[in-house]
Image (cartoon, helix red, strand yellow):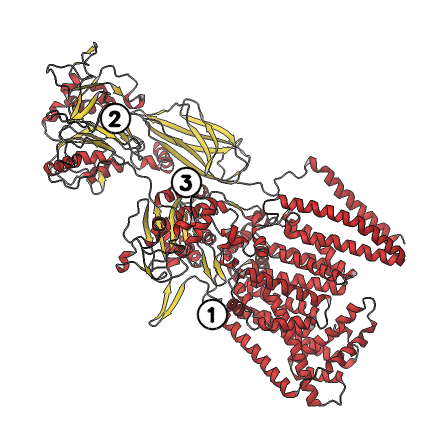
Amino acid sequence: MAAPKVAFLLLNLISILPLLVSSFSPDRPTDRRILVVLDDLSLKSSHSLFFSSLKSRGFDLDFKLADDPAIAVKRYGQYMYDGLILLSPSTERFGGSLDVEGVLDFVDSGHDLIVSADANASDLIRNIAAECGVDFDEDPSAVIVDHSSYAVSETEGDHTLIAADDFIQSDVILGNKKIEATVLFKGIGHSLNPANSMVLKALSASPSSYSTNPSSKLSSQPPSLYGTAISLVSVVQARNAARIMISGSLDMFSNRLFRAGVQKSGSLNKYEKSGNEQFITELSKWIFHERGHLKAVNLRHNKVGESEEPSMYRINDDLEFSVEIFEWSGSSWVPHVSKDVQVQFYMMSPYVLKTLSTNGKGLYHTSFKVPDVYGVFQFKVEYQKLGYTSLSLSKQIPVRPFKHNEYERFITTAFPYYGASFSMMAGFFIFSGVYLYNK
Amino acid sequence: MAAQETSQSATFRHAFGNVLSFTVLLLIGVMAFSIRLFSVIKYESVIHEFDPYFNYRVTQFLTKSGVYDFWNWFDDRTWYPLGRVIGGTVYPGLTLTAGTLWRILNSINIPLSVETVCVFTAPVFSAFASWATYLLTKEIKGAGAGLTAAALLAMVPSYISRSVAGSYDNEAVAIFALIFTFYLYIKTLNTGSLFYATLNAIAYFYMVCSWGGYTFIINLIPMHVLLCIVTGRYSPRLYIAYAPLVVLGTLLAALVPVVGFNAVMTSEHFASFLVFIIIHVVALVYYIKGILTPQMFKVAVTLVVSVGMVLCVAVLAVLIALVASSPTKGWSGRSLSLLDPTYASKYIPIIASVSEHQPPTWPSYFMDINVLAFLVPAGIIACFLPLSDASSFAVLYIVTSVYFSGVMVRLMLVLAPAACIMSGIALSEAFDVLTRSIKFHLVGTTQNPQDNARDATKVNQNDVKSEKSEDTVKERPSRKSKKKDKENIEKPSLVSRVEKRLLVLPLETSVMAVFLLVLLGAFYVVHCVWAAAEAYSAPSIVLTSRSHDGLHVFDDFREAYAWLSHNTEVDDKVSKSKRSDSFALKTPTDVSGISFIASTHYPLILFEVLNLAVLGLVQRNKLIGLLAAAILVQVASWWDYGYQTTAMANRTVIVDNNTWNNTHIATVGTAMSSPEKAAWDIFNSLDVKYVLVVFGGLVGYPSDDINKFLWMVRIGGGVFPHIKEPDYLRDGQYRIDSQATPTMLNSLMYKLSYFRFVETDGRGYDRVRNTEIGKKHFKLTHFEEVFTTHHWMVRIYKLKSPKNRIRGKTKRSKSKSGTSTSSKRSTRKKNPWQ
């Protein structure tokens, strides 16, 4: 009983969401195996809080050293993992068959990635980041220094431990709960190409920060990265909905900074616990698709008053359109409720653009009149919102003109003409009769 | 006219003559049919070219779905995403004819396929056309001229080029309709019978259904009527021949959806209405003249003329104002280019790009009508001896058609029947004179001329004609000069015979002349057979070339289409959903059966398709056909492939041969002329998935897309001004070598054509342009090559999907060996002056 239903659902998804199903198990986008690549096995204990939070959420972690010769994400053409966490900033080369291309293919086939760089990050990590649209400071020994919003600590004058609180404004990415405490960050910064719309600054640096080598003297020229252009943590959502997180600091995942109290310089608020745990946990939830993953199913349309989906509409038909949109909550699909889902009736440009109304149970619907233009139209739902996977549905439907017998047979305004022609006919008949037989 | 002979022996001779001419006509019909079968015998029984393929597809739809569905047919597979209302935009005559033939044949249990019927429609109708020519010429100059003209028309190359078996195009039936309409007009003119006038209107309706060339009829006949009126030949017969045609013909023409209100609203038809008014005025004048005394008549004339002039001027002013207020002055582009031959090339590249619409060259006259070109002047002279209503019509026909053929190569087809009629008259008259001279010398002068002429009939078949023509000649003038009675026939005929007897030539000259004329005819026959066999019968499915090491066959187009049909998605989502509905209840075995049918059916469809050169775009299921080939008469314009691809691969096309939407074609032209990125954007917005280009550079196939590229630039530039033709020309020259402009070298067309070309011979030598290409090593970023045929004639590219990720700006460091080198590099990069 249930099997055919699932199969049907699957079929629907395959037909409607090729974008999404190419990368995820359509039913359960989360609950997967994750490969964690480490520089040093000591990280396993020094960052155990982060790992245990993942484990507690049901992830199956597989730890490998970066130079482990058996390291591989793919076997016989199948990916063995659904996510990859690279906490190996100094690795120049992975042990096994994995390389930059391998990691990128892993992402391009729809899997998620968390990359952490650090001071003296290797070219390997930099290349992976660059391929994802993130440019680390080219000076390998540069770190982020901020003389105004550093975290107050024991060592006076060390302003490389930054207290950052400029988060991305998105409940989807960072969760509903506001992150009160500042986040401690120690590492390198990166910049993003402003033209790249897929990469987002999850955590930006303050205006007074800059990137420099702390051991060298400041040169006269300005540092290559400074101010709010610096991103500390960035997230990428690729077109195939693979999500990537790139951080410039390995320490921010560590137990030490998770637990550390924080006081931002110049601020009186002192937090017992830094915001790192909340920030990292919420972000990893988003990265691993526990939040913000949408699916659209049951795209339907029909004429008003009918239930069958026609193969073709006629101009000026009234039609009803509906689609169901659900969001993955981490354990089940829940209705996605939003007031800004729109449908376009599109032929080279949208002829109709309607905002769909929802019943709160995932069903979005509207009705409209087919425009007075024939052609091959598409129902298009393009739903792209910050943090959500983008929905891009289209369904093609031809619209035909009136058939020759569908026009009005008699037009009221033309009655004088009908009268004229019929009286003419009658007159001609009478005239012929008179002319022929009245000699 | 046989009925008019009175003597008994003459009756017998006439019966014999009738049987003989019937046999000759039958043989002419057989010849007209069989000379067009070379294409079937030498190749195979297939539909040719581009438009025929569309017509075939429409006919298939008609036979499957019936007339009403055909009338209402909205085709969503062509012109994506606009679609096309086929029923309202197609001339249905040909399709309905073939559909009816098929239905009749099936109803009498002759199970021919639709395709077979379509293939043989044109030959059958060319037999009809030669019979119609016989009838028309017989009305003009007698049966002898008629038979000669019919024989000439049966094999005139110009007509063969459009009516070989498989050439299933509008012209195939339209030429018959044209000649037959003219015949009925002349017949009405000669008899004054309302019956023939009605038939004439119906024939005209058939012509309107069949071909846009009907405007030629509706302008030529008014011209002739006007000519008759001006030369004082107005008669009630003229009125009966003309007035019903205009009224009924216009009403009937308006019934054809594609014409509709154009029949009363475009300038092409105005001449007929103007002449319609004039003929009524003239008729009224004649009537009033009959009932009034001469003085009264003069008074009336001055009164009416003064009032009439004022009215006419007013009406004319209104008309001119109406016409002038429309942007194209009420004339469609094609018609304007007839009047001003430079109009199209100046303003409408889309019309000018079709080589059919170019003016012909002198050799094409010789190729298409051969010796007829020399006989036509003689025929015109013969028409003036004496001039009748009918022969003046023939003269007018030949003069106008010569002019139009000089404007557009395509209208050579209209010239051909006129030339045949004229040549038939000329030959027949010449044989008439010559054989009579020979007879005169051989038999001696003792016998009376009438017997002379009679004896001549037995000498050979030509004499039958000559005798007939003689009869007509003597009959016509009597009719024209004296409209009222037919009693005085004998008298003028005797006069004309006496005159003719004076035209006796010396025996040797006559024999020589007859010999030379026969030789001329023989040359004509040889040329026609050659043209039919060699020049016009190739279905252009496969290209062949002969070289010293034998025959080479280029089957690249079918190869490419086969690839497409197997490797691209066949159906839309819409059709898919339909299909799954209809198959939902079937078992898996049924489904496999269906796929079996599909797989056996596909190659069939594919093999029916013929291609010259394609530049097309297939999207999900959408294929654009684009190309501009120019090969003698058979011409493809660059949207021509759309018809084939829809019919063949069952895929939606973006543009096809029906040129109703210039903007849409220009969009595609613009994409081809743009750099890769811009082109990708355009194609993506049209949901295009695959791009096809035809490339002849490897094997030297001249009508490839690079050679047609300038037309794409022009058409694109006509709508999108950022595409400028001079950007693609270096000093006014079109070149693709190292001197070519950067715009040219970066255009999508160039890149798709020459991608990886250098790998073939190491230096990229283009055998069509005979030059080395300008840009040899380059990569495609937004397109990927998916298929290239054996001879590289068709290359298929796929649009790459947008990148999954967007790269950062950092250069990828190649070395992975150690940090030291890379860090050195990066520091160096940062401070290059240190």
Marks 2 and 3, how far apart at CA: 34 Å
Task: Tell me how far mark 1 sits from mark 3, CA to CA.
Answer: 45 Å
Question: Does the image show residue A332?
Answer: yes
Contact? badges 1 and 3 (CB < 8 Å): no
* Residue A261 as seen in the image, left or right of residue B38: left
Residue nearest the viewer, comparing B25 with B244: B244
Residue A410 in the image: above or below residue B599: above
Task: Residue type at mark 1: give it.
Answer: Glu
Image-based side of A92 in relation to B567, left or right: left
Q: Earlier in the sequence, mark 1 or mark 3?
A: 1
Query: Observer-nearest residue: B736 or B107?
Result: B736
Q: In this view, does B549 lie to the left or right of B83?
A: left
Q: Which residue is drawn at 22% across and 16% down?
A: A182
- In contact (CB < 8 Å): disc 2 and disc 1: no
Residue, far top:
A268
**Which of the chains bears the disc numbered 1?**
B
Residue B93 at what x, y percent from top left?
60, 55
User: Callout 3: 10 Å neighbours few (<14), some, many (20+)?
Assistant: few
Tag on residue A229?
2
Residue picked out by circle 3? B685
CA neighbours of label 1 inside 10 A, class few (<14), some (14 to 19), many (20+): few
Q: How many marks?
A: 3
Q: Residues within 10 Å of mark 2 (few under 14, many from 20)?
A: many
Nearest-to-viewer mark from 2 and 3:
2
In the picture of the structure, the residue carrying the numbered disc 1 is B534
Q: Using residue A188 as the reference point, say whether residue B412 is left or right of it.
A: right
Relative vertical location of residue B114 with respect to residue B534 in this rendering, above or below:
above
Residue B833 placed where, x, y %? 15, 36
Assign a secondary structure to mark 1.
Answer: helix
The secondary element bearing badge 3 is classed as helix
How far is the residue under mark 2 from the one under mark 1?
Answer: 74 Å
Residue B250 placed where, x, y %? 68, 51
